[in-house]
Amino acid sequence: MWPWNAMIAGYVQFGQHDQALEVFQQMHLAGEPPDEVTMLSLLSACADNGVLDISRRLHGALMEVCSRSRLSTRLGNALIDMYAKCGSIEAAMEVFKGMRENDISTWNSIITGLALHGHFQDSINLFEDMLKMKFRPDDITFVGVLVACSHGGMIKKGRRYFYLMQNEYGIEPNIKHYGCMIDMLGRAGLLKEAFEFISCMKIEPNPIVWRALLGACRIHGDVKLAEQANEQLLRLRDDTSGDYVLLSNIYGWGREAEEIDG
């Protein structure tokens, strides 16, 4: 078994997912049944490829492997992650509901998957269920929750969860948490608060954070704040060609607004 697993894992590690799936096909033709190690590698390959049809076939093969035993938590987590990345959140939920045992990775995968696929309230509801069941969230959990709040326009909850993360669970925010908060405030048009939030960050804001603010300025037509965000991007010496285009678009919007007002 190990030569097959080694080849599949090697291909997956180097991003050669098609080759990994081809080896699995050869393995099947040779009459060699896959084990959990094989399936974990293949599920990872399908998650990265985002091919739903192959993912379903692998799920079927996995059920045959596990027909005499219970699906392990690791495999269940891999299935949820795979289906979520392939765009089938319904299938991911079905796997989640059918699992007998969950760990924090299980919750993280389904909460984030729901948030990224537009099921914002469902994501928040599952997070609340997780807390009631005494699971302790980690930094990844809060990224998923804050994404749901940002894209779902749940400003009050987003602020509360950001506070809860630090003061209840002792988790220091990383750049992803800050990015979600800036995105949330920017989408809501709270540009001044978003700028002040960046100023109070405990870590150095990166270009992604400033671009989130710049994009919000474009949506809401704040030329002055857009200039400040662009200055910070220049200070970081990042590739700002796209940012100049965005800034010029904001200037254009500002001129149009002045003409209308005039």
Image: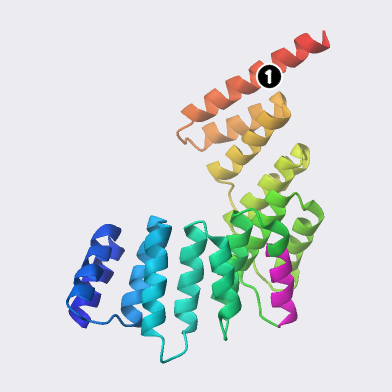
Residue type of the residue flagged with mark 1:
Trp
Task: Tell me where residue 33 sits by quadrant.
Answer: bottom left
User: How many numbered discs sit on the rendered protein?
Assistant: 1
Q: Is residue 218 left or right of residue 57?
A: right
Mark 1 crowdedness (10 Å alpha carbons): few <14, some 14-19, many ≥20: some
Q: Residue at x 60, y 24 (%)?
A: 247
For the N terminus, the quadrant is bottom left
Residue 128 belongs to the span the image colors magenta: yes
| Residue drawn at the location 75% of the way across and 16% of the way down | 257
Q: Is 219 covered by the magenta stretch?
A: no
Give residue 8's quadrant in the image.
bottom left
Classified by dominant secondary structure, the portion drawn in magenta counts as: helix
Q: Position of residue 22 (x, y in %)?
A: 23, 64
Residue underneath mark 1: 253
Quarter of the image with the C terminus in it:
top right
Specify start and end residues of the magenta stretch as a single range: 123-133
Which residue is located at x 79 percent, y 59 percent? 157
